[in-house]
Amino acid sequence: MILCFSVFFVTASLRAESSYTADALPDISVTMNKGGRNELISTSRIEDIILLPGVKYAEPAYFGLYRFDYLKANLTVVGIDPFAEQYSEAFENAVEQNKNILSHDRWMITGQKLAETIDAIYNKKAFSFSQPDGNYIELPIVGTFAPQSQMMSASAVLTDVQSAKEILGIPDGKAVQISVYTGNPEETDTIAQKIAAMFPDTKVETKEIKQTAVSNLFDFSSGIFMLVFAVSLFTFFIIVFDRASGLNMEERKEIAVLKAVGYTPSDIITVRFYETLITAVSAFITALPVAMFYVYGLQAPFLKSIFIGFSYIRPEFILPFVFPAKEIALTFMVTVPVYAASIIIPAWKASITDAQESLR
């Protein structure tokens, strides 16, 4: 039960941590899709999208993965325009803190962990990126990126748009996606449908769809432990079945003695009910704080690494406290009443049996 509770807490915390990145997602993402694969999209399509009623703003997005071979990890390169409106609060803070320096042509802002790693490896606050044509471009680290979600900043690299395009090999007039922002959230789905009808060769996703995908990702990870949960439940029900099949000799004699001294069957069932309830609830409320201490006190050693990976530059963050009430309540309803019934029913059968026969 402690393992199951730990999984519930870690999954709920990571799901909450991932939700912090919601402000960095556009209301609608438009990408080019051909044959099931994503390709670069023409920025000229922004002119048609911006004319749709309800569209507040649309801009090209430049981002992608860069392989950091030294650490065998991927960096997420994001190109931003420091003089454009930032729809992400985290991006806005990063730009505001380094506004004067970002006026230079070349710059990059990284997560604190990545900045420390680069400084330790190369002994300088700069990093040389390999371009697709084989040339190198060196970008100075002008600041650190510290959004609310440390998962997002662990391997993120914010840089100017031109540098991002050169690192990722994006030609002029192309973008990874078109980010669309709507003035009214209730119109987002309708606008997404209009964009999809206007450009049938594109893949149009709303922020809600992407948030659901991220949530499902953690649910899939926790599914590994749900197998353990299912095995634990199977073992639990085997024990319950064994208990429900009858009482052992000592328990039968105990009930017979109670009947001999004047206890009625209802008295015996009442005593058994309270005994079982105290035992089951005590086990439940003991496992709960132990799991909470393991996850939030010790920060779930090993277990957290299974969810977020074992990369050298994996995010180091404190799991936010989240109480998964539904999962905890479901576990309580599945275990405690069933266990109580497996004790009370045999006790009832023994209480209506003749005391002398039970003592023999």
Image: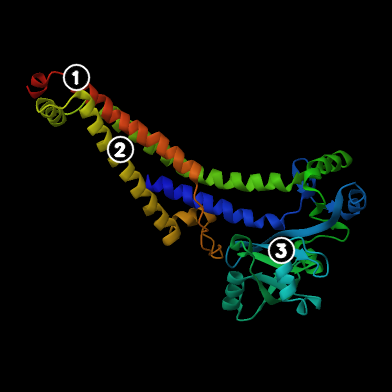
> What's the distance in space between the residues labelled 3 and 1, CA to CA?
70 Å
Other-residue count near label 3 (Cα within 10 Å), few / some / many at <14 / 14–19 / ≥20: some
Residue at (77% x, 47% y) in the render? 185
182 vs 106: above or below: above
> What's the distance in space between the residues labelled 1 and 2, CA to CA?
22 Å
- Give the residue type that dot 1 points to: Ile
- Give the residue type that dot 2 points to: Leu
Residue at (37% x, 38% y) in the render? 232
- Give the residue type that dot 3 points to: Glu
Residue at (32% x, 45% y) in the render? 283
Query: Which percent across, then down, holds residue 31?
Result: 79, 48
Please give left or right for residue 315 compared with residue 333 in the image: right
Q: Which mark is residue 352?
A: 1
From this viewpoint, is residue 245 visible? no
Other-residue count near label 2 (Cα within 10 Å), few / some / many at <14 / 14–19 / ≥20: some
> What's the distance in space between the residues labelled 3 and 2, CA to CA?
50 Å
Query: Which percent across, then down, holds residue 203?
Result: 78, 43
Q: Residue 96's quadrant in the figure?
A: bottom right
Q: Residue 196's quadrant in the figure?
A: top right
SS class, disc 3: helix
Find disc 3 in the rendering and name its residue. Answer: 89
